[in-house]
Image (tube, helix red, strand yellow):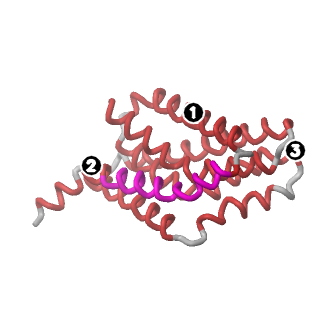
Amino acid sequence: MITTLITGFFSYLGTTSDYFVILVLLFATFRQKSHVQPIILGAYLGNALLVGVALLIGGALKQLPAEWLLGFLGVAPIVIGLKNYFSVEEGEEGKAFVNKVQETPNQRIVWTVVLMTIAGCGADNLALYIPYFSLANWVVLPIIFLMFTAILTICIFLAYRLAKVQKVQNLFERYGDLMQLLIYVTLGIYILFDAGTVTHLLSLL
C-alpha cells in the first residue's frame, strides 16, 4: 500500500511540471480576480477527466492474463520523458496555449482551460496514469484521489502566487524539463521491474 501511494505521488508530481508552467502563464494572462475561479475550476475538471480515462483503461488492462505484460507500459513514460526533454519546441507549448486563450471570451475560460489541460498534458499524463492504475491496488483509490487533489491544489496555489514573479518562472522553465525527465524515466523503470517484466525477460535468456 505504501509503495502504491509513493508511486502515485511521484506519478502525479511528474506530470505537474509542464502543467505548472501553463498555469503560471494562465494566471499571468488573466489578471482580473473574476478570472481566477474559472481557471481553477477548469484545472480540476481537466485533470479529473484525464484521471477518469486512465482509470477506465487501466481497469481494462487488469484483465490481461500475465501481469508481466503490463510492465511494457513502463516504456511509455520513458519515451515521453526523453521526447519532451530533447524537444526544442517544448518550451513554446505553454505560450502558444496562452495566446489562444487570450482571444477567448471570459465565460468560456473554464472549458478553454479544460481543453488546454487535455491538449497540453493529455499524452504525458495518460502515459503515466494508465500503467499506474493497471498495477495499483484499487482499495486505496480514495486515498490516491485525495493525494492527487492535494498536489493539484498546491500546484494551482503556487502557480497563482508565482504568476508575477518572473525570475522564479524563468528558473522553473529552465530546469523543469530535467526534473520531468528524471521522474518519468525512474517511474518507467519502476513499472518494468514491479510488474516482473524485466525478471521474465531475463529468465528467457
Q: Relative to 49, is 33 above or below?
A: above
> Is 180 on the left-hand or right-hand side of 28?
left
- Segment tinted magenta in the rendering: 167-189
Q: Earlier in the sequence, mark 2 or mark 3?
A: 3
- Asked if residue 153 shows in the view, the reply is yes
Is 181 part of what is drawn in magenta? Answer: yes
Q: Nearer the viewer, residue 109 or 48?
A: 109
Mark 3, residues whose alpha carbon is within 10 Å: few (<14), some, or many (≥20)?
few
> Gap between marks 3 and 1, in whole Å?
25 Å
Q: Residue 195 shows which numbered tag?
A: 2
Disc 2, SS: loop
Q: Nearer the viewer, mark 1 or mark 2?
A: 1
Q: Which residue is depicted at the point 37% across and 57% down?
A: 185
Residue flagged by tag 2: what amino acid is it?
A: Ala
What percent of the width, then of the height, locates residue 69?
29, 56
Q: Residue 149 shows which numbered tag?
A: 1
Q: Which residue is depicted at the point 42% across and 65% down?
A: 79
Q: Residue 107 shows which numbered tag?
A: 3
> Gap between marks 2 and 3, in whole Å?
46 Å
